[in-house]
Structure formats: C-alpha cells, structure tokens
Image (cartoon, rainbow, N blue to C red):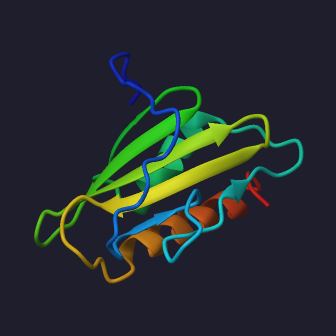
Amino acid sequence: MSSSSFSAPTDLKACPNKPNCVSSKSSDEHAITPFTLSNGATLNMQQLVVLVSSIDARASVIHDEQTLHAEFTSRVFGFVDDLDLILDTNTATLHVRSASRTGYYDFGVNRRRVEKLRSLLTEQSIIQ
C-alpha cells in the first residue's frame, strides 16, 4: 500500500560492518548488481509491490513513485529484514539494499531475496 506519510529516502543507507546486508551501492563484500531496466521498459510501482509481496505474502510494503520499502519478518524468531529499492530514472537503474535489522549473520537470506526479486523482474521482462 502507498502511504502519504512515507518519507522516501533519496539514497540507500550504507551496509553495516556485518555480513547480513547486500547493496547495489556497495563495492565490497556487500556488493550486489543493481537492476537495469530493459530497453523501453517502464517500472510500474504497483507491479513491483506485487512481485515483492510474492516473495513473502506477509511482507509489509510502502512506496511512492520512485522508491519502495518492504519489511520481511522471519517465521521462527520474528527477525525483521528491510528491503529498499530506489529508481534512478536518469540511468534506468533500480538500486537495491536488503539487510537484517539485528544479528550478525543472515545465512545469505538477504542476497537470496534480492536474487529472487531479480529473477521475478527478469521473467516479467522488466529488467535485463
């Protein structure tokens, strides 16, 4: 759902010095390739919300025209992970950050979540 009180970030937060975060703005072990829109593709944020929610139906999602924030809560321990997406219309790039709020190690959950989203976006021909 969209929220009028949603304060959209203008950039992604840096990953902490822990292996529980991936970001397309990082250049170290946290780095992950950003999503590049397919030629002529437009990003419909409502479609993006549906794809993010398909990863986990319990995800809480808010967005505006350029950004999306989702919270995923683990089933067993209730840990919360944040997924942030920011569309750069100048470069047709969707930057991504997925991170655990607590803990040190995430067993690769955040990287797998981003790669699952990459796969879904590729299947829909939204990204290259």
Task: Work out which residue is located at the far top of the displayed protein and give it.
Answer: 4
Can you tell which quarter of the image residue 98 is in? Answer: bottom left
Task: Name the spot of residue 55 as percent of width and height, x first.
Answer: 43, 61
Which residue is situated farthest in the right direction here? 39
Question: For this rendering, which residue is in front, 95 or 30?
Answer: 30
Q: Which quadrant is home to the C terminus?
A: bottom right
Q: Residue farthest to the left?
A: 77
The quadrant in which residue 86 appears is top right
Instruction: Give above or below for 115 relative to 43.
Output: below
Q: Which residue is drawn at 74% across and 34% down?
A: 89
97 vs 48, left or right, is left
For the point 38% across and 30% down, the residue is: 1
Residue 101 locus on image (x, y percent): 24, 58
Q: In this view, does 83 lie to the left or right of 33?
A: left
Q: Position of residue 37 (x, y in %)?
A: 77, 50
- Position of 111 relative to 10 (above/below): below
